[in-house]
Image (cartoon, rainbow, N blue to C red):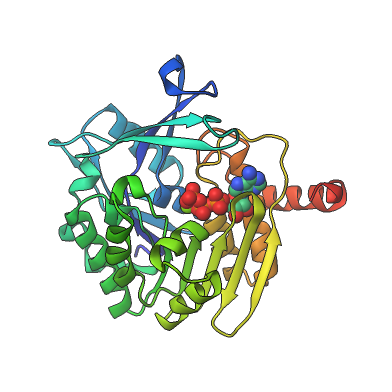
Amino acid sequence: MLNLDFISIGEVLIQLNNISPGPLRYARYFEVHVAGAEFNVLTALSKLGFQVGLITRLGNDEFGEMVLRALRAENIDTTYVKIMDEAPTGIYFIQRHYPVPGKSTVFYYRHGSAASYMNEEDVQEDYVKKARRVFLTGITPALSESCYRAVKKLRDLAHDLGKEVIFDTNIRLKLWKTAENARAKLLPLLQDSKIVFTNKEDLNILFPQTTLEEAVSKLFQMGSDMVVVKLGEEGGSVYTKYGEAYYEKAYRTPIIEDVIGAGDAFDAVFIASLLKGFSLREALKLANLAGMMVVTVRGDIEAQPDWKALEVLKKFYEEKMDILR
Ligand SMILES: Nc1ncnc2c1ncn2[C@@H]1O[C@H](COP(=O)(O)OP(=O)(O)OP(=O)(O)O)[C@@H](O)[C@H]1O
Ligand SMILES: [Mg+2]
């Protein structure tokens, strides 16, 4: 019988990443990658030895084939991947280092994509029963009304069946249109998530006019045990409902190719480290390392670490690069 450590629901897209830095109006060569927040997290978890599965839809087209190959290559269960004729596989472009050096901007061409047609029927109780945990993000519920209902069903089923829900707020205002919309739709979904991954910008949207500490305690009031705040090049912090709080600095890297996708590797490595029995501090350190690794390449999944790579890199920074932290 199929047993999965994690399942998720989300769109997998073709990422066209401009090889040159600068505005896309001058782009000549794009590098092709397969990416999508939930897919990225599952891929990272798979590299760390977990069994994972994704609920999604793809177009019946060449890019859908490419995504399917990526799912298989990364050992992600495709039982609930539906191929549909009526809509295409989504794509998006990445502009790097412009206007802000070291930052990237995304341009979506995903409206009306196959995945945006997901609905309650894509989420089957049978699949949730086979999974130990459910990983959700704030991206999928922003794709369409029917996607919102699909995510809500998965969340509700997970809670009814006693499965842990882990949620990354990942607010994309380009998809939600307004902060008010994002807040109204996301708050009910976040209720009772065991771990919430977020950042300062998202907390500000979810709980306006509060301090970071107040926002975190609101999430505890909503039933969370742990809140992880990602701080980009500053690193990350973790807070628990028992009052523990730790901060770990990011690792400095001489290469920043594309920061997109760092947060997804961070989530996966943090979760995996806790499941391995590592301390909160250690989990934060390893997650920071993983985020840093992803920043050094274009593409979201290619530089995600397995345990061996994490160990090698950690040793390298501890022994030789302490001065750089
Ligand atoms: N420039 C950087 N240098 C080193 N590490 C970085 C850098 N940017 C990100 N990281 C690492 O990756 C982690 C996740 O990055 P980030 O905070 O951007 O994720 P996020 O909140 O998920 O962002 P997003 O808005 O893209 O979803 C950081 O906590 C840090 O450990
Ligand atoms: Mg993120």
Number of numbered labels in the structure image: 0
Name above or below for residue 273 compared with residue 216.
above
Tell me which residue sits at (40%, 52%) in the image.
38
Describe residue 116's horizontal placement relative to residue 35 as left or right. left
Residue at (28% x, 66% y) in the render: 184
Q: Position of residue 252 (x, y in %)?
A: 73, 45
Asked whether, in this view, residue 198 is left or right of residue 117, the answer is right
Outermost residue, front side: 209
Instruction: Provide residue 51's location: percent of width, then percent of height.
Output: 45, 58
Where, by quadrant of the figure, is residue 27 drawn?
top left
Closer to the camera in the image, 322 or 122? 322
Give coordinates of residue 199: x percent, y percent.
51, 59
- Front residue of 310/255: it is 255
Residue 194 visible, this angle: yes
Q: Is residue 29 above or below residue 37?
A: above
The residue located at (63%, 37%) in the rendering is 296
Q: Is any part of residue 306 visible from this angle?
A: no
Q: Is residue 18 left or right of residue 173?
A: right
Q: Quadrant of residue 163?
A: bottom left
Query: Is 13 displayed left or right of 311 in the figure?
Result: left
- Quadrant assignment for the N terminus: bottom left
Q: Position of residue 136 (x, y in %)?
A: 37, 61
Residue 84 to residue 224: above or below: above
Q: Residue furthest bottom?
A: 242
